[in-house]
Amino acid sequence: MQKEFFKKSLSVGYHNVKYTWQQLMLMIINCVRSLESFEEGARSPSAQTIRDRLNLEGEWLASFHTSMWTIAALLLKKFSRYLWWISIDETYVPFFGNRKKLNEELTAQGMGKYVHGYRAKTPGATGSFCFLVISLCCCRVRVPIAIKMMCVKERYRPWLEPWLVRLHKIAPKAVVLADRGFGKAEWFYAMLEAIDVRYVVRIPLRKKENKNKVAAGVQRFQYWMKSILLTVHVAKDSQERMYVLASNIQNKTGRQLLAMYLNRWDLENIFKDADRVELPTSSRNQKMRLFSVVLSFFLFALWQVRSLLSEEYWSLRTFVKHIVAALCTALQCSISLLGEIIKPPT
């Protein structure tokens, strides 16, 4: 899977062809290992050589999705007795620069606006790139199934629905989990009802009558969100924090639904874990931003599979170091502290 992904990510020729795609793969993963950008971690091949040889128009994203789907099918079979969750959320990568100017340039190229106004409380950030992520999780593993970089004001449903339909076919008992950002959208419930999946979604309290019901201690009630009739449960966690949840699962108490919903944090943990093996970039190219995020999710997923299929435990960082060591051995070279590929004397 790793070789296939990088074959689709790197061009064979045109720019500095003396370096093979395997050598470029080695340097890219070495940058990931050191949490360094190309400019910081690559000297020979140079950062410019790697950028020139990166095939950002290639099929690497499709290769990632195919790999994740294969992994999901394998793990669903291996852990068939476990409860599985389909989590949906957004993650944001901060942008530093002239947001308006970049959006105008991208729009002029026919791509649309990619830099959102959301800043995620990051000092100096002027906006961010938004990535919509679907994960398939159980108590043993967390697989980032699919990812899409979202334009400003782009509709989520056309991309989300086909993926959820596919996931529902291979994991029909999995429960969809989502946070309040989706819980306030009528289209989201309409989509889930159309697919006929079970869901637990946290919702914001907006209507005065609903606030009054919760304040009065009502633990279960129904209300119409335009054309969708929602069943709402109110529950508190061990720290007395209140959750308002919409669900179509019958014969479950609010506490039981809350226990399900809290598994949504598995997706948040995917984001945090993937940050430990990221390829830093400040590129203004939205496809380079997407590649960096996808690469971190990809290595995170491969590490999990290796951990599950092997008796020896490696941390995520150690796993990436072993990839670099294995590539150096296969290519009969080493990497200097200055970020240079060194071949043995002939």
Image (cartoon, rainbow, N blue to C red):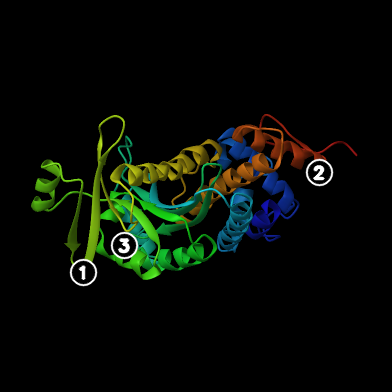
Q: CA distance from mark 3 to mark 1?
A: 12 Å
Q: Is residue 108 visible?
A: yes
In the figure, is residue 202 to the left or right of 66? left
- The residue that disc 2 covers is 330
Kind of residue at badge 1: Ser
Q: Position of residue 238 (x, y in %)?
A: 31, 31
- The residue that disc 3 covers is 188
Q: Is residue 46 visible?
A: no
When the figure is inspected, residue 52 is found, relative to residue 57, above or below; the finding is above
Q: CA distance from mark 1 to mark 2?
A: 60 Å
Q: Position of residue 233 (x, y in %)?
A: 25, 49
Q: Position of residue 132 (x, y in %)?
A: 41, 55
Residue at 33% x, 60% y is 104
Q: Secondary structure at mark 3?
A: helix
Kind of residue at badge 3: Phe
Residue at 61% x, 42% y is 304
